[in-house]
Image (cartoon, rainbow, N blue to C red):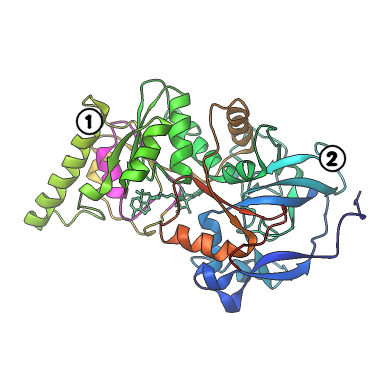
Amino acid sequence: MLDSTRIPDSMRAAVIRRERYGEPDGAFLIERVPVPVVGPGQVLLEVMAAGVNYNGIWAARGEPVDVIAARTRRGATETYHTAGSDAAGIVRAVGPGVTRVAIGDEVVVSCGQYPARAGNEAVDAMSTASAEIWGYETNHGAFAEYSLVYEYQCHAKPASLSWEQAACFLLTAATAYHQLRGWPPHVVEAGDPVLIWGGAGGLGSAAIQIVRHFGGLPVAVVSSDARAEYCRQLGAVVLNRRGFGHWGPPPDPREKAAWESWMSEVRRFGIAIWDVLGARRAPRIVLEHPGSDTMATSLYVCASDGMVVTCGATSGYTVSVDVRFLWMRQKRLQGSHFASIAECDALMDLVASRAVKPCLARIFEFDEIGYAHRLMAANDHPPGNVVIRIGLGSHSPHR
Ligand code: NAP
Protein backbone atom coordinates (compact mmCIF):
# COMPACT_ATOMS: atom_id res chain seq x y z
CA MET A 1 0.00 0.00 0.00
CA LEU A 2 2.99 2.31 0.02
CA ASP A 3 2.93 5.10 -2.51
CA SER A 4 6.67 4.54 -2.99
CA THR A 5 7.08 7.11 -5.74
CA ARG A 6 6.55 9.89 -3.24
CA ILE A 7 8.15 8.61 -0.06
CA PRO A 8 11.89 9.03 0.55
CA ASP A 9 13.95 6.80 2.87
CA SER A 10 14.91 9.66 5.15
CA MET A 11 13.34 12.94 6.23
CA ARG A 12 13.94 16.13 8.21
CA ALA A 13 12.70 15.88 11.76
CA ALA A 14 13.07 18.11 14.84
CA VAL A 15 14.79 15.56 17.02
CA ILE A 16 15.26 15.46 20.80
CA ARG A 17 18.10 13.32 22.18
CA ARG A 18 18.83 12.49 25.81
CA GLU A 19 22.20 14.28 25.71
CA ARG A 20 20.39 17.49 24.64
CA TYR A 21 17.60 17.42 27.28
CA GLY A 22 17.03 20.93 28.58
CA GLU A 23 15.25 24.11 27.54
CA PRO A 24 13.59 23.81 24.09
CA ASP A 25 16.00 26.17 22.28
CA GLY A 26 18.83 23.71 22.70
CA ALA A 27 16.95 20.44 22.88
CA PHE A 28 15.32 20.45 19.43
CA LEU A 29 17.66 19.99 16.46
CA ILE A 30 16.64 19.33 12.88
CA GLU A 31 18.31 16.11 11.75
CA ARG A 32 17.82 13.56 9.00
CA VAL A 33 16.26 10.34 10.33
CA PRO A 34 14.60 7.35 8.64
CA VAL A 35 10.99 7.72 7.51
CA PRO A 36 8.95 5.43 9.80
CA VAL A 37 7.45 2.27 8.33
CA VAL A 38 3.69 1.74 8.61
CA GLY A 39 2.41 -1.29 10.52
CA PRO A 40 -1.10 -2.77 10.85
CA GLY A 41 -3.77 -0.13 11.37
CA GLN A 42 -1.25 2.66 10.85
CA VAL A 43 -1.00 5.60 8.49
CA LEU A 44 2.04 7.53 7.25
CA LEU A 45 1.22 11.22 7.21
CA GLU A 46 3.04 13.90 5.23
CA VAL A 47 2.90 16.72 7.77
CA MET A 48 1.92 20.14 6.43
CA ALA A 49 1.75 21.94 9.76
CA ALA A 50 2.10 20.94 13.42
CA GLY A 51 0.74 22.51 16.60
CA VAL A 52 2.95 23.64 19.50
CA ASN A 53 1.88 22.37 22.92
CA TYR A 54 3.36 21.92 26.38
CA ASN A 55 4.08 18.27 25.49
CA GLY A 56 6.99 19.51 23.37
CA ILE A 57 8.39 21.45 26.34
CA TRP A 58 8.15 18.48 28.72
CA ALA A 59 9.67 16.17 26.08
CA ALA A 60 12.54 18.62 25.42
CA ARG A 61 13.35 18.88 29.13
CA GLY A 62 13.16 15.13 29.71
CA GLU A 63 11.14 16.07 32.79
CA PRO A 64 8.93 15.08 34.49
CA VAL A 65 9.35 11.98 32.31
CA ASP A 66 12.45 10.92 30.39
CA VAL A 67 10.35 9.89 27.40
CA ILE A 68 13.21 8.21 25.55
CA ALA A 69 14.28 6.11 28.55
CA ALA A 70 10.65 5.20 29.25
CA ARG A 71 10.20 3.91 25.71
CA THR A 72 13.54 2.09 25.75
CA ARG A 73 12.40 0.23 28.89
CA ARG A 74 9.35 -0.91 26.93
CA GLY A 75 11.58 -2.32 24.16
CA ALA A 76 11.85 0.55 21.65
CA THR A 77 15.14 0.78 19.75
CA GLU A 78 15.17 4.41 18.56
CA THR A 79 17.49 6.56 20.65
CA TYR A 80 15.74 9.81 19.73
CA HIS A 81 12.34 11.38 20.14
CA THR A 82 10.28 13.24 17.58
CA ALA A 83 7.72 15.28 19.52
CA GLY A 84 4.56 17.01 18.34
CA SER A 85 0.99 15.98 19.22
CA ASP A 86 -1.07 18.12 16.81
CA ALA A 87 -0.82 17.88 13.02
CA ALA A 88 -2.59 18.36 9.74
CA GLY A 89 -1.36 16.66 6.60
CA ILE A 90 -1.89 14.23 3.74
CA VAL A 91 -2.07 10.43 4.03
CA ARG A 92 0.83 9.04 1.96
CA ALA A 93 0.76 5.35 2.93
CA VAL A 94 -1.56 3.02 4.82
CA GLY A 95 -0.77 -0.24 6.61
CA PRO A 96 -2.63 -3.57 6.54
CA GLY A 97 -6.20 -3.39 7.84
CA VAL A 98 -6.69 0.33 7.27
CA THR A 99 -10.14 0.89 5.80
CA ARG A 100 -11.35 4.32 6.84
CA VAL A 101 -8.67 6.53 5.32
CA ALA A 102 -6.98 6.34 1.94
CA ILE A 103 -3.82 7.65 0.32
CA GLY A 104 -4.34 11.30 -0.57
CA ASP A 105 -6.84 12.06 2.22
CA GLU A 106 -6.33 15.39 3.96
CA VAL A 107 -6.63 14.88 7.71
CA VAL A 108 -6.29 16.43 11.14
CA VAL A 109 -4.68 14.15 13.72
CA SER A 110 -5.82 13.65 17.32
CA CYS A 111 -3.21 12.59 19.82
CA GLY A 112 -4.79 9.74 21.81
CA GLN A 113 -3.30 6.34 21.00
CA TYR A 114 -5.06 3.28 22.40
CA PRO A 115 -3.33 0.29 20.77
CA ALA A 116 -5.33 -2.37 22.64
CA ARG A 117 -8.61 -0.61 22.07
CA ALA A 118 -11.48 -3.08 21.57
CA GLY A 119 -13.23 -0.84 19.07
CA ASN A 120 -15.76 0.39 21.63
CA GLU A 121 -15.69 4.14 21.24
CA ALA A 122 -18.24 4.64 24.02
CA VAL A 123 -15.64 3.98 26.73
CA ASP A 124 -13.41 6.77 27.97
CA ALA A 125 -10.45 5.72 25.86
CA MET A 126 -7.96 7.68 28.00
CA SER A 127 -8.82 5.45 30.98
CA THR A 128 -7.69 2.28 29.21
CA ALA A 129 -4.38 0.88 30.39
CA SER A 130 -2.80 1.18 26.96
CA ALA A 131 -3.63 4.85 26.40
CA GLU A 132 -0.69 7.01 25.36
CA ILE A 133 -0.22 10.47 23.93
CA TRP A 134 1.21 10.40 20.41
CA GLY A 135 4.33 12.53 20.04
CA TYR A 136 4.93 12.51 23.79
CA GLU A 137 4.75 8.97 25.15
CA THR A 138 5.13 7.57 21.64
CA ASN A 139 7.64 8.47 18.93
CA HIS A 140 7.22 9.74 15.36
CA GLY A 141 5.21 12.81 16.33
CA ALA A 142 4.23 15.83 14.29
CA PHE A 143 7.53 17.75 14.12
CA ALA A 144 8.83 15.90 11.07
CA GLU A 145 8.19 15.75 7.35
CA TYR A 146 6.41 12.41 7.92
CA SER A 147 4.79 11.03 11.03
CA LEU A 148 3.22 7.74 12.03
CA VAL A 149 -0.31 7.57 13.45
CA TYR A 150 -3.16 5.08 13.78
CA GLU A 151 -6.08 5.23 11.40
CA TYR A 152 -8.49 6.10 14.23
CA GLN A 153 -6.46 9.26 14.98
CA CYS A 154 -7.33 10.72 11.56
CA HIS A 155 -10.25 13.13 11.21
CA ALA A 156 -11.30 14.70 7.90
CA LYS A 157 -9.78 18.17 7.56
CA PRO A 158 -12.57 20.77 7.23
CA ALA A 159 -12.13 22.27 3.77
CA SER A 160 -12.62 25.79 5.10
CA LEU A 161 -9.42 25.62 7.20
CA SER A 162 -5.88 26.36 6.05
CA TRP A 163 -3.25 23.73 6.94
CA GLU A 164 -2.02 25.95 9.76
CA GLN A 165 -5.51 26.51 11.19
CA ALA A 166 -6.23 22.79 10.95
CA ALA A 167 -3.04 21.87 12.83
CA CYS A 168 -3.33 24.30 15.71
CA PHE A 169 -6.33 23.39 17.85
CA LEU A 170 -7.28 19.72 18.31
CA LEU A 171 -5.15 18.76 21.31
CA THR A 172 -6.23 21.67 23.46
CA ALA A 173 -9.81 21.98 22.16
CA ALA A 174 -10.59 18.25 22.57
CA THR A 175 -9.05 18.33 26.07
CA ALA A 176 -11.25 21.29 26.99
CA TYR A 177 -14.26 19.52 25.47
CA HIS A 178 -13.60 16.42 27.62
CA GLN A 179 -13.24 18.61 30.73
CA LEU A 180 -16.48 20.44 30.02
CA ARG A 181 -18.65 17.64 28.63
CA GLY A 182 -17.05 14.40 29.75
CA TRP A 183 -17.89 14.28 33.47
CA PRO A 184 -21.67 14.07 34.04
CA PRO A 185 -23.59 15.38 35.84
CA HIS A 186 -21.05 18.23 35.69
CA VAL A 187 -21.42 19.00 32.01
CA VAL A 188 -21.71 22.62 30.96
CA GLU A 189 -25.32 23.59 30.38
CA ALA A 190 -27.27 26.75 29.63
CA GLY A 191 -26.71 29.40 32.27
CA ASP A 192 -23.75 27.68 34.01
CA PRO A 193 -20.93 30.03 35.03
CA VAL A 194 -17.58 28.38 34.17
CA LEU A 195 -14.26 29.74 35.42
CA ILE A 196 -11.50 29.30 32.82
CA TRP A 197 -7.89 29.84 33.86
CA GLY A 198 -5.62 31.08 31.07
CA GLY A 199 -8.55 32.17 28.92
CA ALA A 200 -6.28 33.38 26.11
CA GLY A 201 -4.25 30.14 26.03
CA GLY A 202 -4.80 27.05 23.91
CA LEU A 203 -7.16 25.33 26.35
CA GLY A 204 -8.77 28.57 27.43
CA SER A 205 -9.58 30.01 24.01
CA ALA A 206 -11.26 26.72 23.03
CA ALA A 207 -13.02 26.41 26.39
CA ILE A 208 -14.57 29.89 26.11
CA GLN A 209 -16.09 28.96 22.75
CA ILE A 210 -17.31 25.53 23.92
CA VAL A 211 -18.93 27.02 27.03
CA ARG A 212 -20.63 29.66 24.88
CA HIS A 213 -21.83 27.02 22.42
CA PHE A 214 -23.62 25.12 25.20
CA GLY A 215 -25.14 28.30 26.61
CA GLY A 216 -22.79 28.64 29.59
CA LEU A 217 -21.22 31.83 30.92
CA PRO A 218 -17.42 31.78 30.49
CA VAL A 219 -15.40 33.75 33.06
CA ALA A 220 -11.84 33.94 31.76
CA VAL A 221 -8.78 34.68 33.91
CA VAL A 222 -5.76 36.31 32.22
CA SER A 223 -2.60 38.24 33.10
CA SER A 224 -2.67 41.21 30.69
CA ASP A 225 -5.04 43.73 29.17
CA ALA A 226 -4.33 42.46 25.65
CA ARG A 227 -5.26 38.92 26.68
CA ALA A 228 -8.37 40.26 28.42
CA GLU A 229 -9.51 41.91 25.21
CA TYR A 230 -8.82 38.70 23.26
CA CYS A 231 -11.09 36.74 25.63
CA ARG A 232 -13.83 39.36 25.46
CA GLN A 233 -13.80 39.05 21.67
CA LEU A 234 -14.34 35.30 22.10
CA GLY A 235 -17.36 35.98 24.31
CA ALA A 236 -16.10 35.77 27.89
CA VAL A 237 -16.24 38.15 30.82
CA VAL A 238 -12.73 38.60 32.19
CA LEU A 239 -10.63 38.93 35.36
CA ASN A 240 -6.97 39.95 35.43
CA ARG A 241 -5.12 37.76 37.97
CA ARG A 242 -2.41 40.43 38.34
CA GLY A 243 -4.81 42.31 40.60
CA PHE A 244 -4.58 39.62 43.31
CA GLY A 245 -1.72 38.48 45.48
CA HIS A 246 -2.69 35.26 47.25
CA TRP A 247 -1.56 32.68 44.67
CA GLY A 248 -0.33 29.32 45.82
CA PRO A 249 -1.44 27.25 48.79
CA PRO A 250 -3.30 28.67 51.77
CA PRO A 251 -1.20 29.13 54.92
CA ASP A 252 -1.76 26.95 57.99
CA PRO A 253 -4.99 28.23 59.66
CA ARG A 254 -3.09 28.30 62.99
CA GLU A 255 -0.99 31.16 61.57
CA LYS A 256 -3.90 33.50 62.04
CA ALA A 257 -2.63 36.69 60.40
CA ALA A 258 -1.34 34.94 57.28
CA TRP A 259 -4.49 32.86 57.06
CA GLU A 260 -6.78 35.90 57.35
CA SER A 261 -4.80 37.76 54.71
CA TRP A 262 -4.99 34.78 52.27
CA MET A 263 -8.70 34.33 52.94
CA SER A 264 -9.47 37.97 52.43
CA GLU A 265 -7.72 37.94 49.05
CA VAL A 266 -9.37 34.72 47.85
CA ARG A 267 -12.77 36.10 48.96
CA ARG A 268 -12.00 39.27 46.99
CA PHE A 269 -11.28 37.06 43.95
CA GLY A 270 -14.64 35.29 44.46
CA ILE A 271 -16.45 38.62 44.70
CA ALA A 272 -14.68 39.80 41.54
CA ILE A 273 -16.22 36.78 39.77
CA TRP A 274 -19.68 37.89 40.95
CA ASP A 275 -18.93 41.40 39.75
CA VAL A 276 -17.99 40.40 36.20
CA LEU A 277 -20.93 38.00 36.02
CA GLY A 278 -23.29 40.64 37.35
CA ALA A 279 -24.82 38.11 39.77
CA ARG A 280 -23.85 36.42 43.06
CA ARG A 281 -23.15 33.11 41.37
CA ALA A 282 -20.14 30.84 41.81
CA PRO A 283 -18.72 28.79 38.92
CA ARG A 284 -20.41 25.39 38.59
CA ILE A 285 -17.30 24.17 36.74
CA VAL A 286 -13.72 25.41 37.15
CA LEU A 287 -11.43 24.50 34.24
CA GLU A 288 -8.13 24.06 36.07
CA HIS A 289 -4.63 23.54 34.59
CA PRO A 290 -2.11 25.94 36.21
CA GLY A 291 -1.84 23.63 39.26
CA SER A 292 0.16 24.82 42.30
CA ASP A 293 -0.63 28.52 41.97
CA THR A 294 -4.38 28.22 41.47
CA MET A 295 -5.77 24.91 42.79
CA ALA A 296 -6.59 26.18 46.29
CA THR A 297 -8.37 29.19 44.79
CA SER A 298 -10.22 26.98 42.30
CA LEU A 299 -11.54 24.80 45.11
CA TYR A 300 -12.59 27.83 47.16
CA VAL A 301 -14.47 29.70 44.41
CA CYS A 302 -16.16 26.62 42.91
CA ALA A 303 -19.90 26.45 43.66
CA SER A 304 -21.28 24.04 46.26
CA ASP A 305 -21.85 20.71 44.48
CA GLY A 306 -19.71 22.03 41.61
CA MET A 307 -16.61 20.53 39.99
CA VAL A 308 -12.99 21.56 39.64
CA VAL A 309 -11.69 19.60 36.64
CA THR A 310 -7.96 19.55 36.04
CA CYS A 311 -5.75 18.41 33.18
CA GLY A 312 -2.41 20.05 33.94
CA ALA A 313 0.02 21.76 36.28
CA THR A 314 1.92 24.48 34.42
CA SER A 315 2.98 26.25 37.64
CA GLY A 316 3.79 23.06 39.61
CA TYR A 317 2.49 19.58 40.28
CA THR A 318 2.29 19.74 44.04
CA VAL A 319 -0.85 21.37 45.32
CA SER A 320 -1.86 22.14 48.85
CA VAL A 321 -5.49 22.93 49.61
CA ASP A 322 -7.71 23.40 52.62
CA VAL A 323 -9.71 20.24 52.16
CA ARG A 324 -12.64 21.69 54.14
CA PHE A 325 -13.48 23.68 50.98
CA LEU A 326 -14.01 20.33 49.28
CA TRP A 327 -16.05 18.32 51.75
CA MET A 328 -18.11 20.99 53.54
CA ARG A 329 -19.66 22.16 50.26
CA GLN A 330 -19.62 18.72 48.61
CA LYS A 331 -17.48 19.80 45.67
CA ARG A 332 -15.87 17.43 43.18
CA LEU A 333 -12.22 17.40 42.17
CA GLN A 334 -11.90 15.56 38.87
CA GLY A 335 -8.83 14.58 36.84
CA SER A 336 -9.21 14.70 33.07
CA HIS A 337 -6.74 13.73 30.35
CA PHE A 338 -7.13 14.52 26.64
CA ALA A 339 -10.34 13.01 25.16
CA SER A 340 -11.99 9.95 23.64
CA ILE A 341 -12.29 9.49 19.89
CA ALA A 342 -16.03 10.18 20.10
CA GLU A 343 -15.28 13.49 21.84
CA CYS A 344 -12.68 14.40 19.19
CA ASP A 345 -15.30 13.71 16.52
CA ALA A 346 -17.86 15.85 18.37
CA LEU A 347 -15.34 18.68 18.62
CA MET A 348 -14.42 18.35 14.94
CA ASP A 349 -18.15 18.69 14.11
CA LEU A 350 -18.25 21.95 16.11
CA VAL A 351 -15.23 23.21 14.15
CA ALA A 352 -16.65 22.13 10.79
CA SER A 353 -19.89 23.97 11.59
CA ARG A 354 -17.84 27.01 12.73
CA ALA A 355 -19.35 26.92 16.23
CA VAL A 356 -15.76 26.65 17.48
CA LYS A 357 -13.05 28.45 15.54
CA PRO A 358 -9.35 27.55 15.62
CA CYS A 359 -7.50 30.39 17.35
CA LEU A 360 -4.38 30.51 15.18
CA ALA A 361 -2.08 33.13 16.70
CA ARG A 362 1.25 32.81 14.95
CA ILE A 363 3.00 30.62 12.39
CA PHE A 364 6.66 29.69 12.91
CA GLU A 365 9.00 28.10 10.37
CA PHE A 366 10.38 24.60 10.98
CA ASP A 367 13.79 25.78 12.16
CA GLU A 368 12.17 28.13 14.71
CA ILE A 369 10.70 25.19 16.61
CA GLY A 370 12.87 25.58 19.73
CA TYR A 371 12.16 29.31 19.84
CA ALA A 372 8.39 28.74 19.54
CA HIS A 373 8.47 26.32 22.48
CA ARG A 374 10.66 28.71 24.50
CA LEU A 375 8.05 31.46 24.11
CA MET A 376 5.35 29.09 25.35
CA ALA A 377 7.45 27.94 28.31
CA ALA A 378 7.97 31.59 29.29
CA ASN A 379 4.23 32.39 28.85
CA ASP A 380 5.37 34.92 26.23
CA HIS A 381 3.47 33.50 23.27
CA PRO A 382 0.62 35.42 21.65
CA PRO A 383 -3.02 34.62 22.58
CA GLY A 384 -4.41 31.47 20.95
CA ASN A 385 -2.45 28.59 19.42
CA VAL A 386 0.93 28.53 17.72
CA VAL A 387 1.90 26.29 14.78
CA ILE A 388 5.02 25.20 12.94
CA ARG A 389 4.89 25.14 9.15
CA ILE A 390 6.56 21.96 7.94
CA GLY A 391 5.49 20.63 4.54
CA LEU A 392 4.86 23.93 2.86
CA GLY A 393 8.37 24.80 1.75
CA SER A 394 9.28 26.08 5.18
CA HIS A 395 12.56 27.82 5.94
CA SER A 396 12.91 30.69 8.37
CA PRO A 397 13.63 34.03 6.70
CA HIS A 398 15.74 34.84 9.79
CA ARG A 399 18.40 32.14 9.24
P1 NAP B 1 -1.05 27.92 27.05
O1 NAP B 1 -1.56 28.14 25.68
O2 NAP B 1 0.33 28.37 27.40
O3 NAP B 1 -2.09 28.58 28.06
C1 NAP B 1 -1.92 28.46 29.43
C2 NAP B 1 -2.40 29.73 30.10
O4 NAP B 1 -2.28 29.52 31.51
C3 NAP B 1 -1.55 30.95 29.78
O5 NAP B 1 -2.14 31.65 28.70
C4 NAP B 1 -1.56 31.75 31.07
O6 NAP B 1 -2.51 32.78 30.97
C5 NAP B 1 -2.08 30.77 32.13
N1 NAP B 1 -1.10 30.61 33.19
C6 NAP B 1 0.23 30.33 33.08
N2 NAP B 1 0.80 30.31 34.29
C7 NAP B 1 -0.20 30.56 35.18
C8 NAP B 1 -0.24 30.67 36.60
N3 NAP B 1 0.87 30.52 37.35
N4 NAP B 1 -1.42 30.96 37.17
C9 NAP B 1 -2.54 31.14 36.44
N5 NAP B 1 -2.55 31.05 35.10
C10 NAP B 1 -1.40 30.76 34.49
O7 NAP B 1 -1.09 26.37 27.44
P2 NAP B 1 -2.23 25.29 27.12
O8 NAP B 1 -1.89 24.63 25.85
O9 NAP B 1 -3.56 25.89 27.29
O10 NAP B 1 -1.91 24.24 28.29
C11 NAP B 1 -2.03 24.62 29.64
C12 NAP B 1 -1.65 23.43 30.55
O11 NAP B 1 -2.55 22.35 30.32
C13 NAP B 1 -0.24 22.89 30.33
O12 NAP B 1 0.30 22.56 31.59
C14 NAP B 1 -0.46 21.61 29.53
O13 NAP B 1 0.53 20.63 29.74
C15 NAP B 1 -1.81 21.16 30.07
N6 NAP B 1 -2.56 20.34 29.10
C16 NAP B 1 -2.90 19.08 29.44
C17 NAP B 1 -3.61 18.29 28.55
C18 NAP B 1 -4.00 16.90 28.92
O14 NAP B 1 -4.58 16.18 28.12
N7 NAP B 1 -3.73 16.43 30.12
C19 NAP B 1 -3.95 18.80 27.30
C20 NAP B 1 -3.62 20.12 26.99
C21 NAP B 1 -2.90 20.90 27.90
P3 NAP B 1 -2.35 34.20 31.71
O15 NAP B 1 -0.88 34.41 32.00
O16 NAP B 1 -2.89 35.17 30.72
O17 NAP B 1 -3.18 34.09 32.96
Residue depicted at x 39% and y 59% = 317
Q: Nearer the viewer, residue 376 or 291?
A: 376
Marker count (numbered)? 2
**In this rendering, position of residue 278 left or right of residue 261:** right
- Residue 286 at what x, y percent from top left? 36, 38
Instruction: Identify whether 335 is placed above or below 275.
Output: below
Question: Does any portion of residue 268 appear in the rendered image?
Answer: yes
- Residue 364 at what x, y percent from top left? 58, 56
Residue 379 found in image quarter: bottom left
**In this rendering, position of residue 189 left or right of residue 238:** right
Residues in magenta?
290-312
Describe the element under mark 2 as helix, strand or loop: loop
Q: Nearer the viewer, residue 194 or 387?
A: 387
Q: Which residue is mark 2?
A: 102
CA–CA distance in space, label 2 to label 1 = 52 Å
Q: Quadrant of the C terminus?
A: bottom right
Q: Nearer the viewer, residue 304 or 139?
A: 139
Residue 151 found in image quarter: top right
Mark number displayed over residue 274: 1
